[in-house]
Structures are given as C-alpha cells and as structure tokens.
Amino acid sequence: MRYLPLTPADRQDMLKRIGAASIDALFTDVPEAARLDGPVDLPMHQTELQVERALSKLAGENTPASSVPFFVGAGAYKHHVPATVDHLIQRSEFLTAYTPYQPEISQGTLQTLFEFQTQVALMTGMDVANASMYDGSTACGEAVLMAARVTKRKKAVLAGSLHPHYAATTKTLAKYMDIAVASTAPDLDGLTGIAETIDDETACVVIQTPDVFGRLHDLTEISEKAHKHGALVIAVFTEPVSLGLVKSPGEMGADIAVGEGQGIGVGLNFGGPYVGLFACKNDRNFIRNLPGRLAGETVDADGRRGYVLTLSTREQHIRRDKATSNICTNSGLCALAFTIHMTLLGEKGLTTLAQLNHETACDLADRLSAVAGVELLTGTFFNEFALRLTKPAADVVDALVDRGVLGGVPASRLYPGEGLEDVLIVAATETNTPEDLAAFETALREVLA
Amino acid sequence: MSMNTQGRPTRIEHDIDPGGYETLSGSRGLDQAEPLLFERGSLEVTGVDLPTPKGGPNRLGSMKREGVIGLPGLAEPETMRHYVRLSRKNYAIDLGLYPLGSCTMKHNPRLNEKIARLPGFADIHPLQPERTVQGAYKLIEELARWLMVLTNTPAVAMSPKAGAHGELCGMMAIRAALDARGESGRRRVLVPESAHGTNPATAVQCGFFTDEIPADKTGRVDMEAFKAKLGDDVAGIMLTNPNTCGLFERDIKEIADLIHEAGGYFYCDGANFNAIVGRVRPGDLGIDAMHINLHKTFSTPHGGGGPGSGPTVFSEALAPFAPLPFIVKTADGAQLKMAENDGDADGEARPFGRLTAFHGQMGMFTRALTYMMSHGADGLKQASEDAVLNANYILARLKDVMTPAFDGTCMHEALFDDRFLKDTGVTTLDFAKAMIDEGYHPMTMYFPLVVHGAMLIEPTETESKSGLDRFCDVLLGLAAAAAAGDADRFRAAPVHAPMRRLDETRAARQPVLRWTPPVAEAAE
Ligand SMILES: Cc1ncc(COP(=O)(O)O)c(C=O)c1O
C-alpha cells in the first residue's frame, strides 16, 4: 500500500524488538467479543488511477458554477480566486502543519494569522479579530453567546432577514445555554419591529447587512438605541467583498462583527470548508470573552519580533469547562487563503472588485426587472437582490436549469411555509459576463411567459 | 571559448571561526527575514488585474463607504515571495516526523487534494438546484456508508465542522434524548481527568456540568470511582477510546453497560479512532455517539490549525435526534435530496436543530473518501496496525531510558512522564525545545494532565522503521545529555530554529493582536 512505508520484514523485526508474538498481541485489551477476525465489509484497496476514475465520475454528475450562467448566492458566492492563492496554500509548510503550538517553528502560520486578524479588523472597522471560526454561521452563534457573557444578559433578538441557517445555528448554540433567542418576522424590509424589541434585558440584536435578500441596512440608529439600553449590536455579513464598497460595521456602531469569509480566497466547495470572521471592539471585557484562537506579537530570547498564540486562558485546553467556547481546530488554511487573496487585492483591488460586483448586479437587476412578471424588491443592495415573480420561484429555478441557467435561490428553500414562495434571491458577481446576464434574462422571459 | 576556472577559489582556504554575527538584513541565509505585509505593501498596489468599472450611479443609497480601509496590497511576485518566505518558517509533516500525540499527523496524500479540486466538487454551490448536485450527494452518502460500516452504527451526522463540533453534535443529541424522555434533570456528565479540554467545554455548552473520574494505576478509568458516581442525575459519560494515555479502555463494555443501566448515554471521543479502524467497531463496544476527526484518522490536512471535519455517528437510541441537514431519498426514490428544514424530516426524526449553515465540510469529505477508497478495508486495517506497531516500537526502544507513564504496551501513541529528567534541571518543555534543534517537531507536552510533565508521542503509520530509529536515537541521545548534566543546552534551546523561545507571558500581559500604523501610535 503506497502510504505505508513498513515492509513485512520491518514488521517482523519490530514485533521482535517489542517482544510481541504477533500484531494481535498488541490488541489484547480489546474485549474479545469486539475483535474483528477479517476486514470489514468494504471494498479493498485501489490504485490512484482507479480512485480517480471512480470519483471523477461522481464529480461529473454535478454542474460546476463556472460551466453555466450562475447566479446562486444566499450565503456563498462565486468569485474568481487567483491561481497564486491555491498554489501558496498548497505549500507543504502551510498545508501539512498543525496548529502552531511550537512558535519557534511555526512563525509562518503565526505571522499570517496576525496579518489575517489585522485585515479582518480593518475591513470590519473593528479593533481586533480572532484567528477564525468554522464559518459565518457558527461565528454568529458564538457572537450571541459572547454578548450574553459580556452583558450578563440572557435575551437576544435576530432580525428576520438574518440568513435562516445562521438563525437556526444560533438558536441551536444558545438552546441549552439558557439564552432566549427570538427572530422577528422575515419581512423583505428586514428590520421592521426590531428596534422595538430592545429593552434593558437585551444582550444583543443581530442584524445582517447586506441581508439574505441582499438589502443594505444602516445600523447607526439601532446601535444608538441598543447602547442606550446596554445592549450590544452584532453585525453579520455573508459576502465579505461587500466591505470594499459599503460602510463597515464599526462605522455604524456595531460592537461585534461576524461573517463569512468564503467570498475572498475560498471557493464554493459545496458549503465547506469556509472561514468564519469574528471581530470586536477593543474592550478588556470583550477580549476576555472572545471565542477561538488569537495570535499576538511578542519577542524571542534574542529580542527579535515574533508571534505566538495568546490569551489562551479563554480556551478549552487551559480553561476546560470554563472556556469561552469549545472550539479547537478552526479554519486555518481558509484563513490563509483569505489573507493571501486579500494581499493580492489590496484596498485598490478590493474596492474595484466590489464595484464590479455591484455594477454587474445593477445591470442584472435592470435586465430582469424589465421582464414581464418580475418585480424588483430590493432598493439598495450590493451584489444580490430579491425578485417577486408571478410563478413559484422553486418552479422557475427548476425550469431555468432546463435552459442551462442556475438562476438563484428560491426564498422558500430558506423560509419554507413563510409565504415567500414567489420570491427569488439572485446574486451577480464579477464572474458573470454580459452574455450570462443576457442568457438569464432570455431564459426567465421564456419561463415566465 | 574556454571556461575561466582561474579566478574563483574552489578550496576552503581559510579556517576562520566567524563567531555569531548579526547580518545587515536580519536574514540568515535561506531563512529570510520577512516583515509584515503592512510594512511591505501599499494602498496603491494591487496584485490582480480587473476590468475598469464603468462608474456612474449606484444603488447603495446612503451605505457607500467614504473613508479609507487601510488594506495594503502587493504585486503578484511580491505576494509570492512574502508567503513563500513565511512558509519556510514552519515545520510540516512533509518535512519530517511530527509526533504530536492525539493529533495524528500522518502523511497527507496529494491525490486527496487533486480530487477535492475537481470542479464538480470544488465549484458547486450548497444551494444550487438539487438535481445539479446529485453526484455530490452520492459522495456524501458513500462516505457516510464507509463511516457507518467502520463503526457499526446505524446513523451519522455529516455536518459537524471539526472534532469539537462533533462533540457538540453528540452531546446535544443526548440532551435532546433526555428531554424527550422527560429526564431533563440529568445534568451531570462524567469525564475522565485525562480528557481533552474540548470534552468538558462541550458538556457545559449543552447545559451540563462535568464530574471528573480519576484514572487508575494503569491509566484507565478507575472503575470503582466510576461506579460510585453513577446515579439518576447522570446524563452520560464522555470517554476517549483509545484514551489520551494511548491505552485501550479494557472495561469499555462494562462502562457502556453500567452507564446505560444508570439511564445515561455513552459519548465516545473518537479522536483516536485511527488506532483501531478496521479492527474494532465502536458500535460493538456500546457507544451512543462518537465524532470522527477526518483531519486525523482519514488524513485530511491540518492546514496550520484547520479546517477539520467531525462527522458524528449515532446508535439507534440517539439516531432520531441527529441534527439537520441530512440526505434523504426523494418520494419516488429516484434522487437524493437534503432535508434542510424542520418540516423536511420524516416521522421518526426529531432533529435537535442545525449546527451550521449548509451541509458540512464537503472539501474534507472528498479528501477523506479518496483516502479511504485508496486504502480499502484491507489497507485501513493495516494502517491501524502499523500505527500501533510504530508507537510500540518507539516505546520499546525508549522505555529503558525515558520513563513510560504506564506499564505494558500501548495503542497508537506512547506516553512518557518526566521522571527520567528528575534532578537534571531539564523540564519537559526544555526537552521538547531541544528536539526542535535536532530537526523534529516536539511531541505533545503536558497533556494528558494526569501524568506529570507528560510527553505523548504519536508517530502514525506513515513513518518508516529507519525514520523511527533515527528519531529514537536522537531522543536517547538527548536523554543522555540531560542525564550528563548538560542542562544549559536544553534551557537555551532552540538555537537553530527560525526563532529562539518566545515570551508568551509578555504576549498575554501586553496583548498586541493586530498591526497598527506607526502614525497612529505616535498620535496616541
Ligand atoms: C482527544 C481529542 N478530543 C477532541 C479533539 C478536538 O478535535 P478538533 O480539534 O477537531 O475540534 C482533539 C483534537 O485536538 C483531541 O485530541
């Protein structure tokens, strides 16, 4: 077997040295009834070529985003990732390293994490960021738990236009922590009624912008109200590219900003792995309550600047049952991909990329809203918007597949039974060509005719 | 034209000891000094070519950003150098033995990477129409089948994003099952002292509290202490098997039976499943839930800290409570679909909720299945056996000089304590740092907590015998040097790494968690 260096002769020699008659002698602590006498009922080993053939066949049964006019978003976005990014993250020293527990031989990982934290803090307009969470949805849940710890309050309110998977994840995480999490109704404006819910017992309000329908929200007023009541504002985003063009959570008074970093550096990957971004204000109480790893600057014995994992007394391996979170393995390599892509872009590239996304989405909105039977529901948006159709959106999306267009996400897939059957969520990015937009428009015209 | 060989000396003519000197650049030959991106880049530079935006009106309303973000960029060649230089300051499994106990640093096959990058897997969206991703669903189902067969369990939740997330998945299912039985009062979770920190942290996130079980003299659960702790407030036990001392819990069946009799559930931390894959099925041991770290046992790369993937298998008793989403057949049986929302689950299912957006770590699923198919049932069994053999070989070679924490053979990792360093002035930490100078990544140190100055060595099956011999020779040599009173060498170590020891206390006391522009500093 190609991954196993030991030869049969090695094995014999080693057993002799150990003083074991056979390999079975090393498994005698296993209860007899649980010892298998032969291999389990699964296929035997295969060559590289065989495995590649079998799995390529499965891959071939899927429709890659790049192969069609593609407009699916709602929490994950198709962007171009420069070839450099994928090359660098496949460097052995990054790909096959463990968590940087020995800083003397892990400065590569540690310095890039420090750069990542800085980039995330800058983009979100916050002071500090951690070294990543699993994804945006778990970051959102952890932010609510953190807000409850910081404020010592047990009530959280989620805007109805927070991505429903994020809302569900947050509710699951809070469920047994004695924190009451409520959502406002999923109206297409997104923020109706949320300010009214804030009172002196509210730990936090959680608002996504751009929201799941693509709508942008200014959080300034709601932040003022929340702060008057001692509550925190958690700003959520699922499209990091938007931060190149729109006001940052920090500018609008948010206390914690969390989001999905997938759109920069990380491909679609059918939902994972992604990278959760987690940033907050510089406040001792906040930082003490942060979940996840943090890289920090220090010096070595010779006084040279270097980086280490720090403030670990928040974490499970030190604090065990009193840890701020149980997270251990995070999204290291995706964070690296994010950082490398961000470094290539720089402010100039990010701003241009964001602008291209926005312009493509504006063009698409113009084209589609000119189709009979389509109403554009989103006034201010970044690269995603909602349409009301004269037919059920799920059926329309299905009919679009037959015309070779992947035309968005029916809102009913995210909000079943909420009366949003006629709403379609459509995203456009820099990867969409004018021909893609035309193909979508034509296909939609046919389907709605 | 003939070559001029005259001008260039080819002999080492001077025998000069240069001593240590600081270079002008801060670099040391191939170990090049590399500043932060923020000290190198500029706001004006970008390393990507993009079309020029049209400009004109926008639909951002009042939401357009006005200020500068402050993100520097680098041109592509500069980006390449920056990150390649940084990469060279890392140790990696591709460079050498990485014997971190409990972490399972095995070779990461590149076929896995290739398959994960096929556009049919890497370039598909979790919410695109289901009939355009049937192959992806089939892959997830096939991986699920392998995991269920290898564990002999009837169900598996695929969405957990890492081991700790899998723990949350399992413990939440236990909580939901207890609630469904009307026994929400059961809040005590028994956790051995040797447990990984994620276990108690997870239990608390599910509203439980933990009660520690001591280890017995052999490094396993103290059965008398365990029995004494059983009662009608016990929700269950979280037990790692093989445990974090690298030992198989001999009494595991009895533990399972007793916890079940007491009305509790058995959560097994499967981080060490790699020792027994293909030889023992945890379902046969009476477990109710167990996460499997695909990034350990099934070779998906650690990536400097993640991502991972922690599918969690369930017994019949807990299967109905498995979280959303999960794959089911369409009504006509012709296609697969994802049950994503509460209403999608059938009569039996009572999912406790959703743990994450979308469907889990597809990129890790493709890698893990590639690895499993490559090995096959026979190869996976051989891999476990070789992992155990390699660990025992290390134990056998070192046990007369270093001090094993417990008697007898081990499973996939060998645990030593620091008795052999007694009176040498060398600590476990010093010993570990000296290994760095020798070109090795240290073993896991000071874990598990039940052993003084613990050194947990996990070689994995992907090391050769000659590689293990070289490693053991070095450790024996270091132990001899410590015994000979060469403590300063250890305390100074490492001296040949990219950095000397770093001041962690300073990092924590005066936290600097991000770069800030020098101007802002001056203004403060
Ligand atoms: C015994 C044990 N349990 C649980 C975990 C947590 O797994 P993960 O880091 O994937 O969350 C680890 C890994 O570090 C471990 O070694």
Image (cartoon, coloured by chain):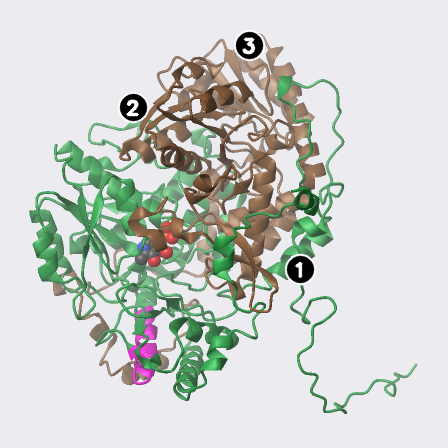
Chain colours: A brown, B green
Q: Are marks 2 and 3 on the same chain?
A: no
Residue B272, image x and y in percent? 30, 60
Q: Secondary structure at mark 1?
A: loop
Tell me how many marks there are. 3
The residue wearing badge 1 is B34
Region of the chain picked out in magenta, as a range? B386-403
* Cα gap from disc 1 to disc 3, whole angstroms: 54 Å
Residue A201 in the image: state x and y as whole percent: 35, 23
Residue at the location (32% across, 46% down)? B166
Tell me the residue that label 2 is attached to: B343
- Residue reaching furthest front? B524
Query: Disc 2 beta carbon < 8 A from ligand 1?
Result: no
| 2 or 1: tag closer to the N-terminus | 1
- Amino acid of disc 3: Glu
Residue depicted at 69% across the width and 67% down the height: B26
Give above or below for B111 relative to B174. below
